[in-house]
Amino acid sequence: MEAITVETTASDSASKALKVTVPVDRVRAAESKAVKYYAQRARLPGFRQGKAPEAVVRKRFGDAIRQSVLEEVIRESWETARTNESLKPISDPSIRNVKFEEGSPIEFELLVEVRPELKLERIGGFRLDRRVTPVTDEAVTEQIERLREQKATWTPVEGAQPAPGQMVRVEVAPLEGDTAGPSQPYDLVLGENRALPALEEEIMKLAPGQTADADIRFPDDHPDESRRGQSRRVRITLHDVKRQELPALDDAFAREVGDFDTLDALRAAVRTDLEQEASRDADARVREQLIGQIVDANGVTAPESLVHKLMHGYANAYQIPEEQLGQFEQQFHPVAETQVKRDLVLDALVEAHGLRATESDVDARVAKMAEARGVPAGQLYAQLEKAKRLAELERGLTEEKVFDFLLTQSTVNEATP
């Protein structure tokens, strides 16, 4: 039989597009095999099992036979492509543009993701600056105020128009002439940009229990381009208004927030948390610097196939509307490109230096997390496994090992912010 031909039509370091042609004699062989399979197992009226004429079998199982032929030639073609092109795929191939006509070769395209082969010539000898942002008294006070807001109560305001910072419960219904459509209830705090500015302005003209009709204009920078600058007439009903009452800033508040005897103890704990966060941020910036210098020193490039795959994944996660995909991809492309380069560098280092986190590493980290939470390690492990977060934990531990390895080979200077 003639050989299956495989031709590379496009490629980068992370993907290949292959045009496959399966000659007619191979298609016929696959078809005969499928017909024989169904003929032996078919139970057709008027015929003993396995004795139905081939023409009857073909007519009765035509679609199934065609599907079997496709599956057979695609499987055989994929094995041929892997061997001929020396592929190292990281996932199953995608099939597209299938041409399957009676008496003709079968043609289709295979899109294959392959593991990029990245050799890093230089991974050390870099100079890195580590800057820890000082924690100011203002930052501590701001965090304390956030805690007060979390413990705040909301008290009804009677007979007064609402103001920024107050919570309102409203209903908004679209108007067609004088007829109101279905109303939509909202609970929102004015001034937090959760509603259109024009709508908030109209709400602040009402007192609880009042209803008014108004034209609401969408701003020129509205996320939905089709609505920018457009106006919609709506009916607004204000049901109630509440003002926020913050708890007193005293030792009692500190005890309510947590295990703190005094307000000074709470302030000290908040400062410690912010300092630890500032230290972690400084470490993250050092890692970012290091990866950037490794990328530049080794001329690492991001294959477009991986960049587009990452952008597609984020677009799905963020539920980006189809009409906004172009703008999203244009804005997100540099971020995706940087992320792909980072992942390629880390993966290359893991493979070259055997830095992948082990099962014992994962177990030790789970035990440490469980101790901090006061729960049994087995229980936490089961929870992480059920939530499918063990792979994420393993990846994090692997990255820690990689950066511990890298930072021993470069110089980190503690710099003044």
Image (cartoon, helix red, strand yellow):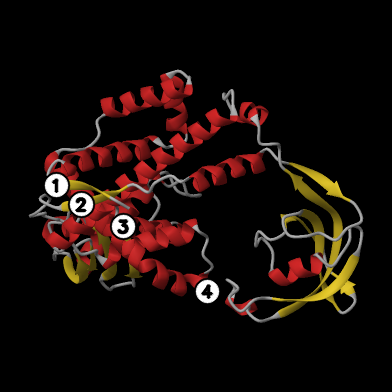
Seen in the image, is 25 located left or right of residue 328? left
Q: Amino acid at mark 1?
A: Ser
Q: Amino acid at mark 2?
A: Leu
Mark toward the viewer: 3 or 4: 3
Nearer to us of marks 4 and 2 is 2
Pick out the residue farthest to the bottom.
229
As measured in the structure, the alpha-carbon distance from the residue carrying label 1 to the one carrying label 2 is: 8 Å
Q: Position of residue 185 (x, y in %)?
A: 79, 57
Q: Are marks 3 and 4 in contact (CB under 8 Å)?
A: no
Q: Considering only order in the chain, which callout, 4 or 1, is on the residue closer to the N terminus?
A: 4
Q: Which residue is mark 2?
A: 128
Disc ID at residue 330 = none
Q: Which residue is mark 1?
A: 410
**Residue identified by numbered label 3:** 339
Residue 345 in the image, given as x and y percentages of width and height: 20, 53
> Which mark, by number, is residue 323?
4
Above or below 326: residue 3: above
- Give the label, 3 or 2, closer to the camera: 2
Residue at 41 percent of width and 70 percent of height? 331
| Helix, strand or loop status at disc 2 | strand
Residue depth check, mark 1 versus mark 4: number of the one nearer the observer:
1
Toward the top, the furthest residue is 376
Task: Report, in whole angstroms, how far the alpha carbon at label 3 lies from the one at label 2.
Answer: 20 Å
Q: Is residue 232 above or below residue 321?
A: below
Q: Is residue 89 visible?
A: no
Q: Position of residue 200 (x, y in %)?
A: 75, 66
In front: mark 1 or mark 3?
1
From mark 3 to mark 4, how far is it between C-alphas?
25 Å
